[in-house]
Image: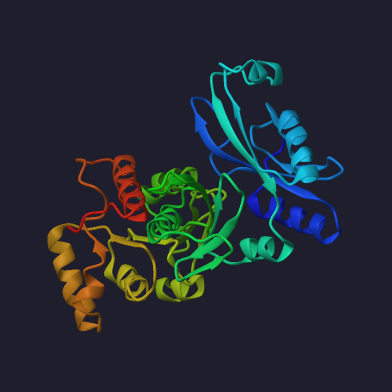
């Protein structure tokens, strides 16, 4: 079964709803063991039994579709558990040692689904008992479901962490927070050996990577196959790329003529991480140059340098691991000020 992204699932569900069809959404709200699809994965089903998306890669789709058709008919939400201890799981083929919990509900109205496709970042918070939902963004809460301040805060933490999850209120109520975020990006300045190791690792971690290097012999398709490359001057490249709060920027050329212009743009952007290669002595000189160029103490203090977590890294691959680890820590609010 081919994988389909979230926007495709919601887009098809929206089209079905606009056509007057009943539509249900099945969402993975919990996984344990070797479940093949992550939390937040969705399957859309219309009243004719057509479907798009996946909640298990094919193992339990048949059973889920049957339950979804019932939800379309009676309007009731359903929570389905499939696991190796459940005889039904064996019947539908989930014998690989994993458990999956699926929440089935009638799809939101077309306007809400369109908003979930187009507005980022945003989260849909759904009461797992009733199916009533509300929308939470970093600056707004709106919808039929009334949430406590604690749940709103946890929903916003979930947006920041980019991890859809079930949360529980003090009164025992359970809510599923489905996050819809802008894509993660990493801009790497300098097509060097460390970059060759870092970029594939970052791609595996879900980052769309762009390598910036105006030195034509460095940023080549042969050295970076399948990677977006830019030979623009570094500040011009970053201005075009418009770093946002889902962007990490790493400068690795070790050349002030290339790194400094990029940092001048990066440190005035909303990028959640900015790191620069160099020793403490090199960084002290860099700080002086950037302040002379007009950056404030607070802006300069955002730079992660020496770049990466201190794991004793020596080789380009080890340094790349340390950089990606620090980027991930920053994304989840765990990075420490050096």
Q: Position of residue 122 (x, y in %)?
A: 53, 62
The quadrant of the rendering that contains the C terminus is: bottom left
- Above-or-below relation of 270 to 226: below
- Above-or-below relation of 249 to 194: below
Q: Which of 28 and 176 is in front in this view?
A: 176
Q: Residue at x 44, y 49 (%)?
A: 199
Q: In which quarter of the image is residue 246?
A: bottom left
Using the rendered image of the protein, determine whether residue 27 is visible from the camera's viewpoint: yes
Using the rendered image of the protein, determine whether residue 188 is visible from the camera's viewpoint: no
Q: Quadrant of residue 280?
A: bottom left
Q: Which of 274 and 155 is in front in this view?
A: 155
Q: In this view, does 128 lie to the left or right of 299?
A: right
Q: Nearer the viewer, residue 66 or 77?
A: 77
Q: In this view, does 254 lie to the left or right of 68?
A: left
Q: Where is residue 233 in the image (x, y as percent from the top left)?
A: 43, 73
- Above-or-below relation of 249 to 317: below
Q: Which residue is drawn at 81% across and 51% down?
A: 22
Q: In this view, does 324 lie to the left or right of 83?
A: left
Q: Nearer the viewer, residue 21 or 193?
A: 21
Q: Which residue is drawn at 86% across and 58% down?
A: 20
Q: Position of residue 135 (x, y in %)?
A: 55, 62
- Above-or-below relation of 96 to 214: above
The quadrant of the rendering that contains the N terminus is: top right
Figure label count: 0
């Amino acid at each position: 079964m081919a994988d389909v992204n979230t926007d495709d699932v919601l887009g098809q569900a929206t089209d079905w709803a606009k056509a007057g069809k009943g539509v249900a959404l099945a969402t993975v709200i919990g996984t344990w063991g070797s479940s093949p699809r992550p939390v937040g994965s969705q399957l859309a089903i219309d009243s004719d039994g057509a479907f798009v998306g996946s909640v298990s890669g094919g193992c339990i789709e048949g059973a889920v579709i049957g339950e979804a058709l019932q939800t379309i008919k009676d309007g009731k939400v359903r929570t389905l558990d499939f696991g190796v201890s459940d005889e039904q799981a064996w019947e539908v083929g989930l014998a690989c040692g994993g458990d999956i919990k699926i929440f089935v509900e009638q799809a939101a109205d077309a306007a809400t689904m369109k908003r979930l496709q187009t507005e980022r970042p945003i989260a849909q918070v759904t009461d797992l008992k009733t199916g009533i939902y509300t929308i939470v963004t970093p600056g707004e809460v709106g919808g039929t479901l009334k949430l406590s301040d604690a749940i709103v805060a946890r929903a916003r933490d979930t947006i920041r962490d980019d991890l859809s999850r079930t949360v529980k209120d003090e009164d025992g109520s359970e809510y599923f927070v489905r996050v819809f975020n802008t894509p993660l990006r990493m801009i790497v300045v300098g097509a060097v050996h460390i970059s060759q190791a870092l970029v594939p690792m970052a791609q595996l971690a879900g980052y769309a990577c762009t390598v910036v290097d105006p030195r034509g012999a460095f940023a080549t398709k042969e050295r970076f196959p399948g990677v977006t490359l830019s030979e623009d001057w570094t500040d011009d490249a970053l201005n075009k790329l418009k770093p946002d709060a889902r962007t990490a920027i790493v400068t690795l050329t070790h050349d002030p003529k290339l790194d400094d212009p990029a940092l001048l743009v990066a440190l005035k952007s909303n990028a959640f991480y900015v790191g620069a290669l160099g020793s403490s002595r090199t960084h002290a000189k860099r700080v002086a140059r950037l302040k002379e160029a007009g950056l404030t103490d607070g802006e300069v203090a955002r730079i992660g340098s020496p770049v990466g977590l201190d794991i004793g890294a020596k080789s380009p691959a080890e340094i790349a691991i340390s950089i990606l680890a620090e980027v991930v820590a920053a994304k989840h609010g765990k990075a420490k000020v050096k």
